[in-house]
Amino acid sequence: MKVLLVGSGGREHVLAWKLSQSKKLKQLYCAPGNPGTAQHGKNIDIADTDIDGLVKFAVEKKVDLAIIGPEDPLAAGIVDALNKEGIKAFGPTGDAAALEGDKAFSKKLMQDNAIPTAEAQVFENFEDAKTYIASRDSGLVVKAAGLAKGKGVYVIDDPAEAILIAEKILNDGLFGEAGNKIVVEEKLLGQEASILAFVDGRNIYVMESAQDHKPIGEGDTGLNTGGMGAYTPAPIVTEKLLDQIQREVLVPTIDGLNRIGAPYRGILYAGLMMTAGGPKVLEFNVRFGDPEAQPILMRLQSDLLDVMLAVCDGTLDQQTLKWDPRPAVCVVMSSGGYPEDYEKGKVITGIEEAEALGDVKVFHAGTKEDNGNIVTSGGRVLGVTAVGNTVKEAQARAYEACEKIHFDGAYYRKDIADKAIK
Ligand code: AMP
Ligand code: GLY
């Protein structure tokens, strides 16, 4: 089969690596890809948001399947555009991708289907938002409704500050059109977990739980990032909780989408808060998480291409997936300064030495090739991922691997997966 993989991050490298293990794969194209995906396929210089360009390429090359990694092209309807040209595509249609692309839509779907989530109100007008926020006396969360690269969410204890943020988003265009609407919701307390599932419109296959680490600093301090590390499984999500999440969250979400004529196919990712009152949805994503995909897919032993085709064909119930029972931990190495300003172009050494440890894979994210060297080109640079017999062993191996890798200004959190060990 000929496959086109869209995206260029660590998620796309692990997808390319996993797909390349399929006997069915004849040719992999990655648009635009990175030096990691180039180890497994041919990188094509088309941006992941250039829908016309991607569709044209897929038609020209007669690709059998397009796999969409990131949320922006999904929300913009790339799957609809590909399907229209007769190209099979892995990922939800634009309507269904609104689950991530429009937090107001997503909240309404949850409210209509009694899916446990934070109480919330949606505002387009600042004066209304102000009146509502001023009437609240507990912690609040203000969210831009559209896609804002994970930066559009503010967890705030002081209502006066929440009013200022609401004004910046609604009146001052802080996030452009993504901030035409805001969702103001109650602040939930608890530990977070990510549950990812393959969904084929009807059938749901839940993968093992994972936990991300969003803030830049150890002990979850400092600014939020795209994610500084992840591990799987997350011991906080017991079998019983996983059943509850499937029953109370995943099934009614898929049913609710079917009822409004937006059947869901692809990866459904529920970001959850494990509150004293049970699991509640913080957000939905319509794709693999980055960096959750790295440790989760490192444990997948089945053919990913088969599973993805089954999702597109509505035959997921005929698939049995095999997983490595051992836990996996991914530590993200980032450029010094990230998520604020950072320098690029630093030469990276030691990747081979790290992988030589065994049970270690180093996934590229913000890297590029430059005169035969691999250099840094983004904030999150590498996802150093290891499996081990226990979380502790996987963690120790991941950190041993990080110590072998060098670039100027390299930074990583030293406490990834500590929560699973305590
Ligand atoms: P979101 O993109 O909506 O998942 O929000 C990003 C992060 O903000 C989450 O991973 C949580 O850490 C935090 N967050 C979002 N909503 C809430 C909430 N209602 N209560 C507490 N924290 C939240
Ligand atoms: N790791 C969180 C996300 O991919 O949105």
Image (tube, rainbow, N blue to C red):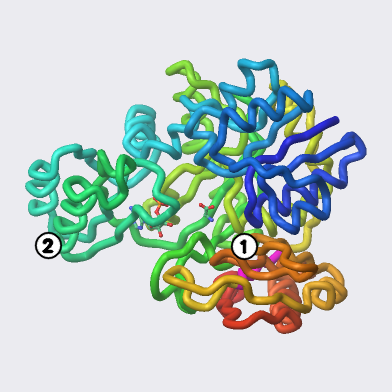
Q: Residue at x 74, y 71 (%)?
A: 390
From the viewer's perspective, tell me whether residue 169 is left or right of residue 333: left
Percent coordinates x, y for residue 209 in the rendering: 61, 53
Q: Which residue is mark 2?
A: 160
Percent coordinates x, y for residue 211 in the rendering: 56, 60
Name the amino acid type tagged 1: Gly
Q: Is residue 260 above or below residue 42?
A: above
The C terminus - image quarter:
bottom right
- Give, as a single range, the part of the protein colored magenta: 328-333
Q: Is residue 74 above or below residue 281?
A: above
Main SS category, magenta section: strand
- Taking the magenta stretch, the answer to whether it contains residue 330 is yes
Q: Mark 2 falls on what kind of element?
A: helix
Q: Residue at x 49, y 21 (%)?
A: 262
From the viewer's perspective, tell me whether residue 176 is left or right of residue 318: left
Q: Is residue 223 above or below residue 288?
A: below
> For residue 371, what is the image quadrant?
bottom right
Name the amino acid type tagged 2: Ala
Q: Dot 1: within a 10 Å radius of its alpha carbon, few (fewer than 14), some, or many (20 or more) residues? A: many
Q: Which residue is mark 1?
A: 366
The N terminus - image quarter:
top right
Q: Which mark is residue 98?
A: none
